[in-house]
Image (spheres, grey):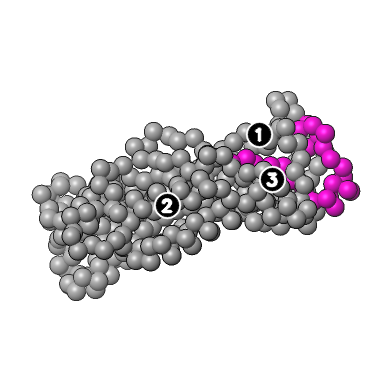
Amino acid sequence: MDSLGSIAMFVQVADSGSFSATARQLGLSSSAVGKSVARMEARLGARLFRRSTRHLSLTVEGEQFLARCRRILAEVEAAEQELSASAKGPSGKLRISLPRYSGLFDTAILAFMRAYPAVELDLDFSDTLVNVVSDGYDAVVRTGALADSGLASRRLCTFRRLLVAAPAYLARHGHPATPAGLAQHTQLHYRFPATGRLEQWPLAPGDPVAASAMVCNSVEMRVFLAVQGQGIAYLPAFTVGRELAAGQLESLLDDHTQEQATFWLLWPASSHLPPRLRVFIDFLVEKLEKGGPASRPGEPWFGT
């Protein structure tokens, strides 16, 4: 069995994509790093990297082995931190993937940084699907139904989506009386980066669907265009709380937008969580359960 040092070196090579870069980081020669990986491949009986004069990439076996190695190193690190009598609190780096929703996590992240200054946050805001383990994330926040992925999870909160438009737009084009009436209006749609599909609006079966006036993968752009009177948008309530309260936007067909979506926090299942990840999970759950900006005056932006 390879030592933890060899496993750590393999992970570092996979992250840097280069024997020479890893060698510089560890103060070794490139040949020493290459020989260490070669010995590991010989012992495993599998090729971990595809090599060329200019490029180094993981094989399928290498990807699988990398996921296991990350978990091994995380377990060792967690055990060391838990057993260290000199530890004065959570510290180290956390790599977190979050969805690109403006206004949802800002306050919680700021409060966490102030409460745990020794924890370094590496935040990636993206709507694309990620592999928590092989992509090197400590945790991810995503919405929707959970697949049986082998990941541990905590429910953060639920939220509504609202159909919204600017008063100026509604003055020109009128209010849709039914979901079917949306077909007569300019629609600002969202395209999911992972699938390329458009987000489903709250239409009844058989209702006509209008051609989109604009499609994008940005919440902020759709909020901006809706405020500017360019059409109707279907948006998470918490992203338009300020605009609704200020009268810049109005919600439409509220009886047809009661369905709720759920945010989940996901991380690799483990019996030993690093203290920094454990406090981050508990902190985020607690902060989001306390609520946020209103979707309409006097109405909560999500449920818990």
Q: Is residue 85 magenta?
A: no
Quarter of the image where one finds residue 269: top left
Marking on residue 298? 3
Residues at marks 2 and 1, CA–CA distance in whole angstroms: 28 Å
Q: Is residue 163 magenta?
A: yes
> In the drawing, does residue 61 fall left or right of residue 230?
left
> In the drawing, does residue 170 fall left or right of residue 10?
right
Q: Position of residue 107 (x, y in %)?
A: 53, 58
Q: What's under tag 2, amino acid-wise?
A: Phe
Q: Which residue is mark 1?
A: 258
SS assignment at label 3: loop
Q: Which residue is mark 2?
A: 283
Q: Earlier in the sequence, mark 1 or mark 3?
A: 1
Q: What's under tag 3, amino acid-wise?
A: Gly
SS assignment at label 1: loop
- Tell me the magenta residue range: 159-182
Residue located 82% across and 37% down the image: 176
Residues at marks 2 and 3, CA–CA distance in whole angstroms: 26 Å
Q: Position of residue 296 (x, y in %)?
A: 70, 46
The answer to which of 92 and 188 lies nearer the viewer is 92
Residue located 15% across and 54% down the image: 40
When the figure is inspected, residue 40 is found, relative to residue 262, above or below; the finding is below
